[in-house]
Image (tube, rainbow, N blue to C red):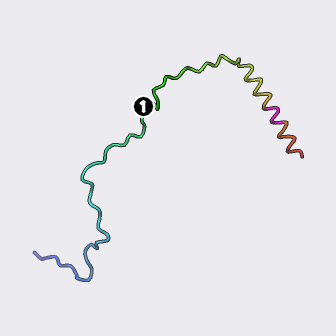
């Protein structure tokens, strides 16, 4: 059987192109979500019955009308 000889001008694998060795062990798993609470205080439930819904609707409509009037007046100048 013939021996394989390489040319002295061209190395088989330059040192700069050497591939890194694989890791010896796997990395630990990463927890992307931490389910623990930020604090231990108990949260009180939100009570929405303090203001009637019709007050919120009417207030929002009045605010939107006033804002529209101001913006329309500013654009007309």
Disc 1 is placed on an element classified as loop
Could you tell whether 25 is left or right of 33 in the image?
left
Residue at the extreme right: 77
Give the image location of residue 38, x and y in percent. Answer: 46, 32
Please say if 3 is above or below 31: below
Q: To which quarter of the image does residue 13 belong?
A: bottom left
Give the image location of residue 5, x and y in percent. Answer: 17, 78
Give the image location of residue 65, x and y in percent. Answer: 82, 32
Tell me the residue at 77%/23% (across/down).
Answer: 58
Q: To which quarter of the image does residue 36 belong?
A: top left
Tell me the residue at 65%/16% (across/down).
Answer: 49
Residue at the extreme bottom: 9
Query: What residue is disc 1 on?
Result: 36
Question: In the rendered image, which quarter contains the N terminus?
Answer: bottom left
Could you tell whether 7 is left or right of 73 in the image?
left
Queried whether the magenta region covers residue 65, the answer comes back as yes
In the image, which residues are magenta? Answer: 64-68
Please say if 30 is above or below 1: above
Could you tell whether 36 is left or right of 18 in the image?
right
Magenta stretch, overall SS: helix
Q: To which quarter of the image does residue 29 belong?
A: top left
Give the image location of residue 42, x and y in percent. Answer: 49, 22
How many discs appear? 1
Tell me the residue at 52%/23% (across/down).
Answer: 43
* Label 1 packing within 10 angstroms: few (<14), some (14-19), many (20+): few
Queried whether the magenta region covers residue 53, the answer comes back as no
User: Closest to the observer: 22 or 77?
Assistant: 77
User: Closest to the observer: 62 or 3?
Assistant: 62
Could you tell whether 5 is left or right of 36 in the image?
left
User: Closest to the observer: 49 or 58?
Assistant: 49
């Amino acid at each position: 059987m013939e021996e394989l000889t390489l040319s002295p001008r061209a190395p088989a694998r330059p040192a700069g192109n050497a591939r890194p060795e694989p890791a010896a062990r796997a990395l630990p798993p990463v927890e992307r979500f931490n389910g623990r609470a930020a604090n231990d205080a108990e949260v009180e439930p939100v009570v929405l019955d303090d203001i009637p819904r019709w007050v919120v609707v009417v207030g929002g409509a009045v605010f939107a009308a006033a804002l529209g009037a101001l913006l329309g007046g500013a654009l007309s100048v």
